[in-house]
Structures are given as C-alpha cells and as structure tokens.
Image (spheres, coloured by chain):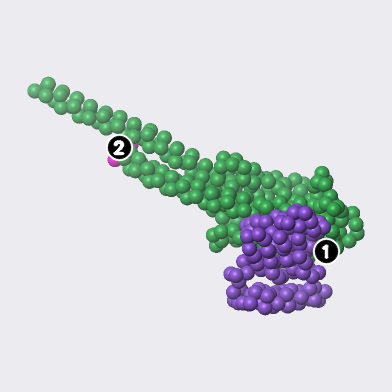
Chain colours: A purple, B green
Amino acid sequence: MADTMQFDLVSPERSLASLRAREVQIPGAEGDLTAMPDHAPLITTLRPGVVRVAGPDGEAAFVVTGGFAEITGEAASVLAERAILAAEVTGAMIDDLVAQAEAAAEAAPAEARDAANKVVADMQALRAAVGA
Amino acid sequence: MPSLKDLKNRITSVKSTQKITKAMQMVAAAKLRRAQDAAQEARPYAERMGAVINGLALSVRGSDSAPRLLAGTGDDKVHLLVVMTAERGLCGGFNSSIVKVARYRAHKLIGEGKTVKILTVGKKGREQLRRDLGDYLIGHVDLSEVKRIGYANARDIADQVMTRFDAGEFDVATIFYNRFQSVISQIPTAQQIIPAPVDEDAEASALYDYEPSEEDILADLLPRSIATQIFTALLENAASEQGARMSAMDNATRNAGDMINRLTIEYNRSRQAAITKELIEIISGAEAL
C-alpha cells in the first residue's frame, strides 16, 4: 500500500496546492471525513470549513467556503470556490464571510432558509476552528 | 502639391502616432502575458469541474429528478444570448467578430420564430448591437472599472443569468466570446451553458460513491459550473483582446513606418526640386547679364 497520495487544492482562479499527502481532512457536506491512500472513490460536496493536509513535508490547513472534493485511491482533489491558507485568515475576513452568509440567509426563500442558516453556522464555527 | 512645411508637419504627426501605437503594442504584450497566465491557472479547476459534471450528468440524465439547469425547461422558444466583448476598441476585429457571430445567431433565431434576448458584457458589443438589435437588449454588465477579472465578476454575471432563468425569462442560454488560439488568431465561439450540454462520448464515472446523492451534488455544482464557464470565457476573452490589440497595433506601427518612408521621400524630392529651381533661376539670371 502506498503511504502517500497526490493532493490538489484548486480554486477557480489558481491552483493553491499540489503535493504528496498522507491524509487529508475534508469538511464534507454530510460530515467531516479523512481521506487516506486507497480510499474508495468518492465525490462529495463541501460545507464551509477547514481542509487539513498532513504529508511527509509537514502540515497545511486551508479555509474553504464550499465546492467539492474528488477522492480516488491515488489522489484527493479539492475544488473550492474560495480557498485561503488558514494562517492568513483574519478575524475581519471571517466577519465578512459571516455577514455575507447572513445576508444570503436573509434573502433566501423559505424552503432554502434552513440550508442558508446552516451556512451561517458553519461560517461562525470557522472562527473557532482557525482561532482567529 | 503640398508645401515643404505641410510635409514636415505630416511626418511629425505620423511619427508621434507611431510612438503611440508602438507603446500600445508593448502594453498589450505585457498584459497578454498576464492574461494568458490567468487563463492557464484557471484551467485545472474548469477541467475537473467539467469532467465531474459530465460524469454526473450522464448518469442522472433522463431521470425525473434531474435539475432544471441540466434538463432544461422542456422548451426552446426563448433564447438568451450573452455577448461578451471588450470595454475598449483599437483591437482590430476582436469586437466585431464576436458581434458578427452573435448577430448572425440572433437573426437566425428570429427567422425561426424564436424570441431572442441579449445580455451584453462589455461596452463595445453593446454599442454595435444597439444599432439593429436594440429592442432585444435586456441588460448590460459593465466591467470597465475592473482591472483584473476575478471569479467574483464571473459569479455576478452567472447570478444575473440564473435569476433570470429561475424567473422563467428564457429557455436556452448561450455565451459568445473569443477563444484564444494565438496572438494572431482568436476564434469567435458560441457555447451553450443552459441547459448544460452533455458530452456523450465521455465515459460515465460510475465507480464513484456520491455524498450526498448524485442529484443533490449536481444541483449544487451546476450553478458553480455556469459561473466557472463564464469565468473561463471572460479570461479567454481578456487574453484574446490583448492578443488582437497587440497584432493590430503591430500592423499600425508598421503602416506608420511605411507612411513615414513615403512622406520622407516625397519631402526630399520636393526639397531637391526647390533647390534645383532656385539654382536654375540664379544661373539664368547670371547668364542674362
């Protein structure tokens, strides 16, 4: 069994990371999951959260706001709408994201209100997760 | 016959024009590199997204729960044409070639009895389309303040398109832009974005597990995919614009050079003619004495 797999993190504007990883923690829409080499092929959507990568060259964490992840036995690719290195995230940025999410929740029609409120909660949880 | 002074003035003015076109060419070359890099950087995301959507679409298509963005409204009466052009001119046939393709499509659809609505992105396309298709313009997105196109710009356009789609304003949406081939060749392209086209030849990605269900993922991804396609188109357009401007300005610089040569020859000839004339006058004056 291979002990590392290819990890790619791409946003629409550019590719943020491409490295070998031992494990990748992904905030899936239906719960967090950790992908390791030889994981069963899976595609999942993301909720706002933190993607953590651990590899031979150290660890890295990225804040993502949504998107999806494609996991195969040899690779994990995260396609994030917005992704920021967790170390660079500031409290103001999170305030901004929370405000945006709240505005969206406010404007959302009744049937989408629950989902929008969940996004707000996820955004607020981000603050604790990155300690900003 | 223009006087020597006139010729001299013209040469000076052509020379300063040449300096401007030369500078514009160099600016365009620098911007082109940046635009190309941006297009390159955006490619992996767009390609992955396209592949995943296509795989999902192949397996979901046909089921009743397929999202409307994929299945369409079941009609194709009202077409939305999103025409993306530049905010500036002086870039050769760049704007006209997009407008030409869009106009041809619009007239064809109108001829078939369909309703056409046009959303313009970029000032130049709007100006050209207003002349004969002014009644069909329903909106305009202004990017003249935008220095560097970001994903947020694309999402704004996508949101606008989706809001109109959800309101039942159109059945089919197509984007028009120039695909960047090389500095001298940009291909005007029409690409259907709603309903999402499905590539039949691609193999279905049946081996994946989906979390949540395929339909839910698709419903989440399709709007993103539309924004991504618009983003790709905007970036291709930006690169094409700079490429087109670069070659147009290169031509202009060369033309100005030719013109300067021609005018200089003419100037020298007339100067020589004037000297010869004066000499003849002096000599014949001297002979007469």
Q: Is residue B228 visible?
A: no
> Which percent across, then down, holds residue A62?
65, 66
Q: Which mark is residue B272?
A: none
Q: Which residues are magenta?
A: B2-6
> Which percent across, then down, holds residue B21?
44, 46
Which one is nearer the viewer's eye here, B225 or B286? B225
Chain for mark 2? Answer: B
Q: Nearer the viewer, mark 2 or mark 1?
A: 1
Circle 2 is placed at which residue position? B3
Question: Does the residue at mark 2 contact the one at mark 1 (Cβ under 8 Å)?
Answer: no
> Which percent across, then down, holds residue B265?
34, 31
Chain for mark 1? Answer: B
Mark 1: which secondary structure? strand
**Quadrant of residue B5 in the image?**
top left
Which image quarter is the C terminus of chain B in?
Answer: top left
Q: Main secondary structure of the magenta part?
A: helix
Q: Give the residue type that dot 2 points to.
A: Ser
Q: Is residue B79 left or right of residue B246?
A: right
Magenta segment: does it hold A85?
no
Q: Which mark is residue B211?
A: 1
